[in-house]
Image (spheres, rainbow, N blue to C red):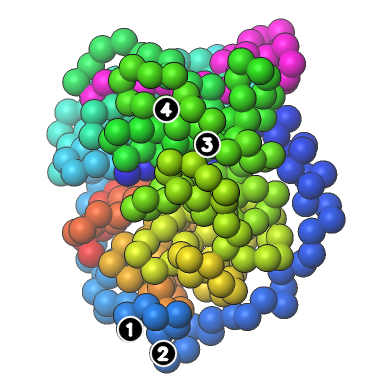
């Protein structure tokens, strides 16, 4: 399962205009870190005392890694190299390694815009990015944002849909993604469903500006003009999860009870079927990634890899060195990227 977020520069301009009329979220109810009871039907859960207390294990020393994903056996990441003097156009190299370390495998290399994304499902690694054009990098002359599949076993990189980079999720049968910011008749906006393998994209809903897309069970969750929405995977009328805009969701994660989401420096939860958003954490800087598992929520901000129980109890930093980023969690460990030197980074494993 994969989830991630991106808005290319043109989309960001539109989002900025849309958000200019949105109300401030400072007066929302806050879950204090010493709150003692679960909310909205969730099972009581407090952070385990030993989460993050073990010594970090460096899985790999890598180049300028920017994004990380995991599956049952491997870690996948992308390294950014800048061949041009301007910072909009990186060359991205996608690699993998066993979760316990070993030899690194290069899977693909592609030119991209600076905002790109990475995901993984049972058979493929996915990369979302606008095509690089050195003479034009904004719509309408720029190439559409494109989602590409890289077979885990090796093989050619295949373009599968025009999707907003980062706005996709897979259930191994279909890819669900948000149409790109420069949509045209041939490259629609809204929520798209793309069959894995052969098949043309199907427009499920023509949402105006999709912030993020993820899935859980039979539903698709996405942001549209600062409101999180839920709709069936088969399409239909979306349902607002809450009524008052909070700005774009820069990260989104769903479990059986809640949708967890980030708006710049704030981490919220809202009941999966809708309700009042509750503030779990306010960062000292922008929150850059998010994951949730087994009643705990994990995030990164510039000087902190944090964990808090999903009922708002016991939030703390479990790593403060090397600017942690791109956290991903499985049943037994926490994986993330941190700086080693100015040009080298580490992929780190912390036992849970």
| Residue name at image x 16 percent, y 40 percent | 73
The mark that comes first in sequence, 4 or 3, is 4
For disc 3, the marked residue is: 204
Front residue (pair 26, 178)? 178
Q: Residue at x 35, y 33 (%)?
A: 174
Q: Is tag 1's residue or tag 4's residue first in the polypeptide sequence?
A: 1
Q: Which residues lie in the magenta part?
A: 131-152
Say if the magenta span includes residue 134. Answer: yes
Q: Are marks 2 and 3 in contact (CB under 8 Å)?
A: no
Residue placed under numbered mark 2 in the picture: 37
Q: Tell which of 237 and 190 is nearer to you.
A: 237
Regarding residue 66, the answer to whether it shows in the image is: no
Q: Residues within 10 Å of mark 2 (few under 14, many from 20)?
A: few
For the C terminus, the image quarter is bottom left
Q: CA distance from mark 1 to mark 4?
A: 38 Å
- The residue where tag 4 is placed is 194
Instruction: Give the SS element for disc 4.
Output: strand
Q: Residue furthest front?
A: 236
Q: Are marks 4 and 2 in contact (CB under 8 Å)?
A: no
Secondary structure, mark 2, is: loop
Measured in 3D between alpha carbons, the distance from the residue under mark 2 to the one under mark 3, in whole angstroms, is 39 Å
Q: Are the residues at dot 1 and dot 2 in contact (C-beta closer than 8 Å)?
A: yes
Mark 1 lies on a secondary structure that is loop
């Amino acid at each position: 399962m994969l989830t991630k977020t991106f808005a290319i520069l043109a989309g960001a301009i539109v989002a900025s205009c849309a958000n200019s009329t949105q109300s401030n979220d400072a007066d929302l109810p806050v879950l204090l870190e010493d709150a003692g009871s679960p909310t909205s039907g969730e099972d009581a859960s407090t952070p385990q005392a030993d989460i993050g207390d073990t010594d970090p294990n460096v899985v790999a020393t890598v180049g300028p890694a920017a994004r990380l994903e995991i599956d049952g056996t491997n870690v996948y990441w992308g390294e950014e190299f800048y061949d041009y003097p301007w910072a909009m156009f990186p060359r991205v190299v996608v690699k993998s390694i066993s979760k316990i370390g070993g030899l690194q495998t290069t899977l693909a290399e592609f030119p991209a815009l600076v905002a790109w994304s990475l995901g993984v499902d049972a058979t493929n690694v996915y990369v979302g990015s606008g095509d690089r054009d050195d003479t034009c990098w904004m719509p309408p002359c720029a190439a559409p944002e494109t989602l590409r599949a890289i077979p885990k076993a090796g093989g050619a990189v295949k373009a599968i849909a025009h999707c907003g980079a980062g706005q996709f999720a897979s259930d191994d049968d279909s890819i669900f993604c948000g149409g790109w910011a420069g949509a045209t008749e041939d490259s629609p906006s809204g929520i798209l469903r793309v069959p894995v393998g052969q098949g043309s994209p199907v427009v499920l809903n023509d949402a105006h500006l999709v912030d993020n897309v993820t899935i859980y069970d039979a539903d698709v969750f996405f942001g549209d003009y600062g409101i999180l929405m839920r709709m069936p995977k088969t399409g239909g009328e979306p349902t607002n999860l809450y009524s008052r805009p909070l700005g774009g969701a820069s990260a989104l994660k769903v479990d059986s009870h809640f949708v967890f989401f980030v708006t710049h420096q704030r981490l919220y939860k809202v009941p999966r079927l809708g309700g009042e958003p509750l503030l779990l954490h306010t960062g000292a800087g922008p929150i850059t990634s998010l994951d949730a598992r087994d009643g705990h929520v994990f995030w990164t901000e510039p000087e902190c890899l944090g964990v808090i129980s999903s009922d708002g109890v016991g939030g703390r930093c479990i790593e403060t060195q090397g600017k942690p980023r791109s956290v991903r969690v499985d049943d037994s460990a926490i994986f993330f990227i941190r700086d080693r030197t100015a040009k080298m980074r580490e992929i780190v494993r912390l036992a849970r």
